[in-house]
């Protein structure tokens, strides 16, 4: 084996280790950047102030995680109940009612709150829904469409398993915003609306960042460990030759 090839084989593991260290550090800082971005969204969402007035369902997707104000009329006959919503060990429903916006056109689905289920599933709770133009404030969030299903996803009747704006759109025959408004304003309808704080995954990104930094430190530590061993061997051989 030539001396140049020996040097290459000797140096190659250290080069790979350093590159791995650099890559892990970059991935760690990328995760920290994502955490900082989501923290800024959290600050915007939690900031107290006048909710932004949204007048069109077409551009509503840009206001995700923001508190907004909507004005419109209820489509009361299209109210549905999200099943299996347990609160303090009591089964119940989330009440969803489409709101036709007064200006700009389109419909926004509003999660109006939680209501306890009755003794018989055939008898749904009676929810007072005022007629005429109303104003609501709430938080715009993406619907949770995850989860395994045995059916084809086509909800039937007033009891649904998931809040799917696309299904509302096909049912109503009008444009429906892709986000759902979680109502926070009081409508004196008896529904409970103390929503849990949505998790943006900030802690997850920070944990991933720490993991990448640990990998980087491990790669750098291994490079240092083997370099020190090789240096000791080289020094021992030099001492014997001299």
Image: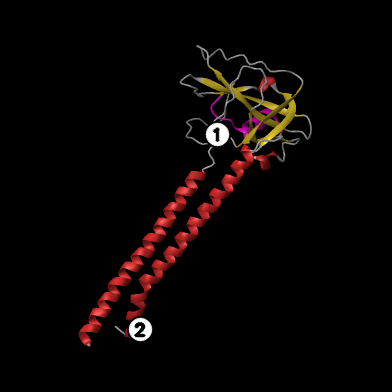
Residue 157 visible, this angle: no
Horizontal side, residue 31 vs residue 128: left or right: left
Which of 156 and 34 lies nearest the eye of the viewer? 34
Which residues, given as a range, are shown in magenta? Answer: 160-174
Which of 143 and 27 lies nearest the eye of the viewer? 27
* Quarter where residue 220 is shown: bottom left
Can you give x and y, in whole percent of width and height, for residue 219 in the image?
38, 63
Residue at image location 42% in from the left, 64% down from the top: 20
Q: Which mark is residue 197?
A: 1
Q: Is residue 172 shown in magenta?
A: yes
Horizontal side, residue 193 vs residue 53: left or right: left
Which quadrant of the rendered structure holds the C terminus?
Answer: bottom left
Disc with the residue nearer the chain's start (2 vs 1): 2
Q: Secondary structure at mark 1?
A: loop
Residue at image location 72% in from the left, 18% down from the top: 130
Q: Residue furthest right?
A: 103
* Quarter where residue 175 is shown: top right
Residue at image location 64% in from the left, 41% down from the top: 44
Query: Residue beneath label 2, please?
Result: 4
Give above or below for 23 relative to 196: below
Give above or below for 39 relative to 49: below
């Amino acid at each position: 084996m030539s001396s140049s090839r020996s040097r290459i084989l000797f140096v190659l593991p250290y080069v790979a280790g350093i590159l791995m260290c650099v890559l892990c550090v970059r991935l760690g800082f990328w995760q920290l950047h994502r955490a900082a971005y989501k923290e800024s969204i959290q600050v915007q969402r939690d900031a107290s102030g006048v909710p932004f007035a949204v007048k069109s369902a077409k551009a509503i997707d840009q206001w995700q995680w923001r508190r907004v104000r909507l004005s419109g009329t209820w489509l009361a006959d299209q109210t549905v109940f999200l099943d299996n919503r347990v609160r303090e060990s009591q089964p119940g429903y989330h009440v969803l009612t489409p709101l036709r916006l007064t200006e700009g056109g389109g419909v926004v689905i509003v999660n109006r709150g939680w209501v306890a289920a009755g003794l018989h599933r055939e008898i749904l709770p009676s929810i007072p829904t005022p007629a005429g133009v109303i104003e609501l404030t709430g938080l715009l969030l993406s619907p949770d469409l995850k989860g395994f299903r045995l059916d084809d996803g086509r909800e039937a009747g007033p009891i649904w398993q998931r809040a799917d704006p696309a299904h509302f759109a096909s049912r109503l025959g009008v444009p429906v915003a892709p986000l759902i408004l979680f109502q926070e304003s009081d409508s004196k309808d008896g529904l409970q609306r103390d929503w849990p704080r949505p998790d943006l995954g900030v802690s997850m990104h920070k944990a991933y960042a720490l993991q990448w930094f640990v990998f980087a430190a491990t790669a750098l530590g291994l490079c240092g460990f083997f370099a020190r061993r090789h240096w000791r061997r080289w020094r021992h051989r030099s001492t014997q030759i001299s």
